[in-house]
Amino acid sequence: MTAPLAGSLPDPPKHVAIIMDGNGRWAAARGQSRQSGHQAGAGPVRTVLKAASNLGVKYLTLYAFSTENWARGQDEVENLFALLTQYLDSEVAELLQEGVRLKGVGDLKRLPQEVLTALAQAEELTAHNKGITLSLALSYGSRAELTAATRDLAIKVKAGEIAPSDINEDLLAQSLWTGTLPDVDLLIRTGGEKRISNFLLWRIAYAELYFTETLWPDFGEEDLKAAIADFHSRQRRYGRTI
Ligand code: IPE
Ligand code: IPE
Ligand code: MG
């Protein structure tokens, strides 16, 4: 690791991923519905995106809906997708202005048509932006992602397009839904749970993990800065000695 020059700031983490958890508990603590918790969760998405971009983060990946979240009640699932569509429609002008490139990652074909349409539109409009890449993990689960990538590679081998010996870490990584993303440097989970919940298993191999009790609707710029400051206090060794 190179020591930063005296007085200069250390490089920010290039890729920050966040498990945005705690909306339901935030609402329950106020005697409100889970729905209002999810609604309150949109504010921090805006704040954190802006703050991350200003801090020089190049990739921000947010876990918005997991493969396993399909098992929630139909009302909650429908509400989450309505909020997401609303977010995409109302935010796209701002994303354009801020130079944000938006991407959806996950088993996107399972998403309701209106979400797919809003997502495709936002992706297309922001495709040439040069600022931070915001990836929304939707209908995302790492096991499903690795399974799909394995199946794709098997199909290519069977078709004679590649040989089994062509399969290496790079090719497998490129075959993932997150194929164009770099490895995660800093993974943040809000809401107090200390688990990964099937998020970005391949990409977090050497990520620094940061868990906070703060519930997602309460998470703000100072919380992001605290997580990044903590990241800078870590010594990343990647298995080597220093
Ligand atoms: C995270 O908040 C949002 C999603 C999973 C979509 P939760 O809804 O999981 O909130 P808690 O964990 O029940 O508080
Ligand atoms: C993880 O939160 C998924 C998202 C934040 C979208 P969950 O609330 O679904 O995770 P568990 O069930 O506590 O592991
Ligand atoms: Mg939760």
Image: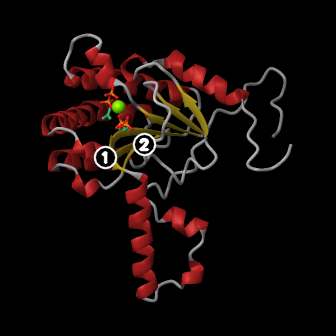
Residue occupying the far bottom of the picture: 160
Say above or below: 209 vs 103. above
In the shown orientation, is residue 114 left or right of residue 214?
left
User: Is any atom of residue 112 visible in this view?
Assistant: yes
Considering only order in the chain, which callout, 2 or 1, is on the residue closer to the N terminus?
Answer: 1
The yes-or-no answer for disc 2 within 8 Å of ligand 2 is yes
**Amino acid marked by disc 1:** Glu
Please tell me in which quadrant of the rendered image residue 92 appears: top left
Total labels drawn: 2
The answer to whether mark 1 and mark 2 are in CB contact below 8 A is yes
* Residue occupying the point 46% across, 89% down: 160
As drawn, the label of residue 203 is none
- Residue 88 versus residue 144: which sits nearer the camera? 144
Note whether residue 118 is visible. no
Q: Is 111 situated above or below 153?
A: above
User: Which x, y percent locates residue 17?
Assistant: 50, 38
The quadrant holding residue 165 is: bottom right
Residue at figure coordinates x 17%, y 35% from the top left: 82
The residue drawn where x is 76% and y is 50% is 239
Instruction: Give the number of the disc on residue 68.
Output: 1
Assess mark 1: CB under 8 A from ligand 2?
A: yes
Give how far apart the Cα atoms at labels 1 and 2 are: 9 Å
Q: Residues within 10 Å of mark 1 (few under 14, many from 20)?
A: few
Q: What's under tag 2, amino acid-wise?
A: Ser
Q: Decide if residue 170 is on the left or right side of residue 159.
A: right
